[in-house]
Amino acid sequence: GIQVEQSPPDLILQEGANSTLRCNFSDSVNNLQWFHQNPWGQLINLFYIPSGTKQNGRLSATTVATERYSLLYISSSQTTDSGVYFCAGRGGNTPLVFGKGTRLSVIA
Amino acid sequence: DSGVTQTPKHLITATGQRVTLRCSPRSGDLSVYWYQQSLDQGLQFLIQYYNGEERAKGNILERFSAQQFPDLHSELNLSSLELGDSALYFCASSTGQGEGYTFGSGTRLTVV
């Protein structure tokens, strides 16, 4: 099945800083999603982005399907951005496979 | 509110017991997926149902079983519980036509 690798595993930022999270996948995907898991455990869907670029406020994501990677950009980070960011992909009819996540801590 | 409803939100039970977790998918979604997230682990796929039928199976233990009912809600049954079964259990739904999944808020199971 598809392997999903995320980097970096951990990230500490000062409030107001920008960051880029990366997701590499081992094979072609037809579904690529980014999620934020908050400190209470809730899994929030950020983007469904099998290809191209999307933006939502301070967050944006780009997937380059031909090169098998996706990037999540967080600008002007806030303490509420803290948590774990997961990338997940699927190919064909296989279920969504998650990476191990990037743990982000934003410090005031 | 994502539209996917999971109950209960928290569950504490003793080793050896059996519990049932419930999931109501988003309106119109035919596929239901169950995932397990143990402490400091990523999300592991357990099982998928599509319109009442089992579609895919992941790393689901034999002590665990699931089903999807005619009204499309799903239940995950966990039996002979062990301490290691303590985890967050998530349900997700989709139309089943290859687009994004929507996750519920999870059930936090603690086995003592």
Image (spheres, rainbow, N blue to C red):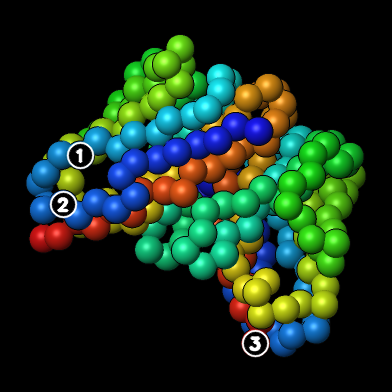
Residue B112's mark? 3
Subunit under mark 1: A
Tell me the quarter of the picture where residue A53 sits.
Answer: top left
**Residue placed under numbered mark 2 in the picture:** A13
* Disc 3 secondary structure class: loop
Give neighbour class at mark 1: few <14, some 14-19, many 20+ (Cα, 10 Å): some
Residue A84's mark? none
Answer whether labels 1 and 2 touch (C-beta < 8 Å).
yes
**Residue placed under numbered mark 1 in the picture:** A19
**Is A2 placed above or below B11 here?**
above
Question: On the rendered structure, is A4 left or right of A91?
Answer: left
> Mark 3 vs mark 1: same chain?
no
The picture places residue A104, in percent across and down from the top left corner, at 28, 53
Q: Can you say which quadrant of the picture contains the C terminus of chain A?
A: bottom left
Question: On the rendered structure, is B47 left or right of A22?
Answer: right
**Is B83 placed above or below A51 here?**
below
Q: Can you say which quadrant of the picture contains the N terminus of chain A?
A: top right
Sooner in the amino-acid sequence: mark 1 or mark 2: 2
The picture places residue B91, in percent across and down from the top left corner, at 65, 51
* Disc 1 secondary structure class: strand
Subunit under mark 2: A
Subunit under mark 3: B
Identify which residue is drawn at 76% across, 77% down: B81
- Total tally of numbered discs in the picture: 3
- Looking at the picture, which amino acid does disc 3 mark? Val
Whole-number angstrom distance, CA of label 3 to CA of label 1: 40 Å
